Amino acid sequence: MGILSRLSKAQRRQIFGSFVLNWMPRLSILLATVSFLWLLALPHQGYSKRTYVSESALLPGNANLLYQWTDSMAAEAYRETVERISTLSSLERAQALEREFAEIGLKAATQSYTLNTSTASKSGVNTYAVFYAPRSDGTEALVLSASWTSRDKITNTNAVAMLLSLGKMFKRTSHLSKDIVFVVSDGDTEGLQAWLKAYHGNEQNTYERSEEALRVRSGAIQAALNLDFAGTGDYNALGIFFEGVNGQLPNLDMINSVADIAASVAPVELTLHDELVPMTENVTKNYINSLKRMLYMMKYQAVGTPTGNHGLYLKYKIDAITLYGIDKPGWHSQRFNLFRIGCLIESSIRSLNNLLEHLHQSFFFYLLSGVRRYTSIGLYMPPVIILGVSFICQALSLWGVSSDLPLELEAMARNKNAVVGLPYARRARSVKVPAAVVGLSFVAGLASFKLLTTQFGFPGETPLLKLVASVGVCSMLVLSAVSSAQVRHRILKMQAADKTKKDVKTPNNQDSELAPAPDWITLKTFVLALSALVVTTLSALNFSLAVSIGVVIVWPYLYFKPSRLMPLNVIQTVILAGISPPGLVLFASWWYTMDVSLVLGWVLEGYEILGTWLLPTICCIYWPINLAATVMVLLPVS
């Protein structure tokens, strides 16, 4: 501060201007690079910590288990029953399962539902039963749920059989203080969604959806375990799925307690999701494996669709996870059967039964690079903020370029005794055209969103046809904006030529207004500022989605600008089209070998059934900024 105070005002302005124009773009690139390296360092063991159970009341694995071999044999008998009734219709299957729960001694009932979306019409019948604990006052409950269809797209036989076996076992216990609710849902996620809506009194009997009211219920649900054990065989490992709708996560103690139980009472190999990765002594391989697991988690979070039915509980602030049986022949770990699964589930229920309140001691925001390694929010949020700052630095530099600052620095460089210029600018910034382009881009994005989510009733109406119509609307916007800018450029060029002639006649006119800055500079400033706003704000809501957007757009948005070389402009436009929503849909279709209509239908169903944010975020925020960037690279250079 002492050195700066001894400098003249012109010298201080020269230093500041030089920093804004010359060093801020370099600082922007440096910050983006630091952000990438920080994100890549997160899976390293030096940045992650070992998990631990924070809630002392859980006491995982300390209870004496009552699940015996006779219960495992009962589960095998129920497995044959489940296989027999799984071929029936939804109603007959639900009624048969209701009778099985009633024979055990539980209060059971069925619930029918219908759901109409823009892509399909779905209906089904759920079955549910309640075990009223002897020591319970009916105000709290735990849920054990399973869907008829596994994530492997086959019958979830072992899971349904396990629910019946556990219900029979709980009937002879007297130490539980929370009721146990058993739910076998129909369909994919829509069945459990209908049951949860009815359980919490949110029935919606409209043309789009209808849920039957529940005849049997218990108290407030404290936690839930969703079972996914497909087929009738044994398993090599147990996978944990925990991502919910829009990236929601359960309390980390849910995962930690199951991990402790799997390591002691019911020893099974535990992994995240369905990926079995061997641990080695090679540090590099371990880092790559940890990075893969973290990227899998971020992928599931970014799309916003839950990785299992457990994700629907998280919408109601109910901590839940899915236990998934992995059958991988030839894997080195010892295979386990229904007995060990039953012991693990009973011990988990006994731990959750000890809770006096909702889980709250451990983290709700975290990244997992392994079952036993986590990264807290304090370590993974800074790189996203740094990425947003890199956009802002570039935007501030461009804002300075569009002002009188470059001309002042040039004059000061020629004359060291030059004084600071006038307090008002002689170079006008053209804000109207860039602001109009940005505004119309958001209008086009909103129109595309309405096109995709509205059912017009036309013959042959499909999501793919709506996407083509949306692309047409956005293409018209780009062509109109570029054409208007070209016409305006020619008009300004003619005005500049006339002004030059006048200045020749009056050479002493030093206060004449300079030519305005090119429109693309101001438009790119708006694009970068909006990108920073989106990335930093979205990171607080869905970190993985914010990172995904930032990683895709950061280098094109920082480097791309109009060029007098037409091939370069074409290349930039093609790249921006590739990272636009239609381009990403085509890439996802190729990557997952799915039809484009199926990818669109999956995104639409996630929005209409589960309320995911992916579609509105992409259409109403990401696509408009991408359109503005496309217009920017096609604008005249000067």
Image (cartoon, rainbow, N blue to C red):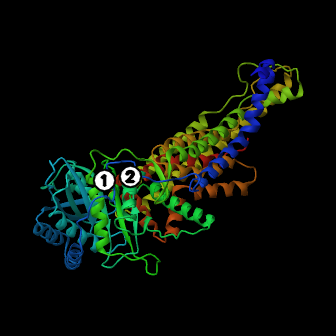
Residue marked by disc 2: 253
Quarter of the rendering occupied by the C terminus: top right
**Disc 1 + disc 2, Cβ < 8 Å:** no
Q: Position of residue 626 (x, y in %)?
A: 56, 49
Q: Quadrant of residue 157?
A: bottom left
Side of 236 where 11 appears, left or right: right
Q: Secondary structure at mark 2?
A: helix
Q: Please give the name of the residue rendered at 20% of the width and 57% of the height, measured from the top-left corner.
A: 180
Q: Position of residue 307 (x, y in %)?
A: 39, 61
- For the residue pair 32 and 130, the one nearer the viewer reads as 130
Q: Secondary structure at mark 1?
A: helix
Residue marked by disc 1: 313
Q: Position of residue 521 (x, y in %)?
A: 68, 39
- For the residue pair 303 and 526, the one nearer the viewer reads as 303
Q: Position of residue 86 (x, y in %)?
A: 22, 76
Q: Please give the name of the residue rendered at 28% of the width and 66% of the height, measured from the top-left corner.
A: 147
Side of 387 where 618 appears, left or right: left
Q: CA distance from mark 1 to mark 2?
A: 16 Å
Q: Please give the name of the residue rendered at 42% of the width and 69% of the height, measured from the top-left corner.
A: 269
Residue 221 visible in rendering: yes
Quarter of the rendering occupied by the N terminus: top right
Mark 1 belongs to which amino acid?
Tyr
